[in-house]
Image (cartoon, rainbow, N blue to C red):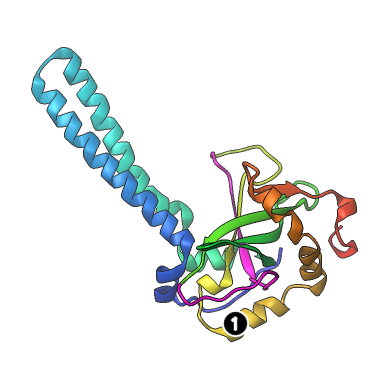
Amino acid sequence: MRHFEFTVDRAYAKSVNQTLADMRRLQVSAIILGFLLAATAVVLILLGQLWSIALGVFAAIAALASVWVALWVPKKVGSIEDLYAKSPLVPALVAEIHPRAMTLLSLIDIAKPGTGGPSYALVTRNIPIRAGQKQSIGDKVPSVALLGDRRNHSDADRWETVSPMPIAWGTRDTAVRSRAVNAIDQVEWDFLQSRIAESEEIRTRPDQRVILSEEELPEILR
């Protein structure tokens, strides 16, 4: 598994990193839901009826669960420094450009450690285009692969959730980005370039990925 070391600009990452933004949105939603459920629980319990008290207790438990989710998410995800340090470096290209977003196409090994060998997949992710950002189809976007499961103790051989997170979301230093590009074998970049036309099909799949057969891969990845 290939990793890439660099100093994360935390302030910059907080302003542009969509993974952090998604996490914050989840936390805010969980907190708002928790407050609504707590208010509902109070009203129901104050009604003083047996049925309302039972529903109120249920709502209170649900409110506590929502607050727990808000507190648990950052611990589960880890710090932005941990995400970049522990996640493997992968190639990604700009495969599609939309009015306010673009689609990244990435080549990622989605096999879990100890499962007997790699299992490569083409994976897409839609990301917003920032103001003033200029991108072209085929531009290299070195990234790290965020790998995880939807449930604890999954016994699947492949990671259930996979997504590329650009190095550019962790630093504004163009030299770091260039170093990340060079750390990835040119064969992998060339392979991705040859598969750009498949981006739309992959993007519209429920899991936004397609697993590659060994015969499709460059020799060095088999």
The residue labelled by disc 1 is 176
Determine whether 103 is above or below 157 in the image: below
Residue 59 position within the rendered picture, expressed as x and y whole percent measured from the top left: 25, 29
Q: Secondary structure at mark 1?
A: helix
- Quadrant where the N terminus sits is bottom right
Mark 1 closeness class: few <14, some 14–19, many ≥20 residues within 10 Å: some
Residue 37 position within the rendered picture, expressed as x and y whole percent measured from the top left: 24, 34
Q: Residue furthest top?
A: 50
Which of the 4 quarters of the picture holds residue 87?
bottom right
Determine whether 44 is above or below 215 in the image: above
| Residue 140 is covered by the magenta coloring | yes
User: Is 24 left, or right, of 88 in this rendering?
Assistant: left
- The residue lying toward the viewer, choosing from 205 and 155, is 205
Report the residue at 48% width, 77% height from top.
Answer: 132
The answer to whether one can see residue 206 in this image is: yes
- Quadrant where the C terminus sits is bottom right
The answer to whether one can see residue 112 in this image is: no
- The residue lying toward the viewer, choosing from 15 and 222, is 15
**What amino acid type is highlighted by mark number 1?**
Val
User: Is 154 left, or right, of 77 in this rendering?
Assistant: right
Residue 179 position within the rendered picture, expressed as x and y whole percent measured from the top left: 66, 82
Determine whether 73 is above or below 185 in the image: above
Report the residue at 50% width, 80% height from top.
Answer: 172
| Residue 127 is covered by the magenta coloring | no
Magenta stretch: give its range: 131-151
Count of labels shown? 1
Q: Residue furthest bottom?
A: 175
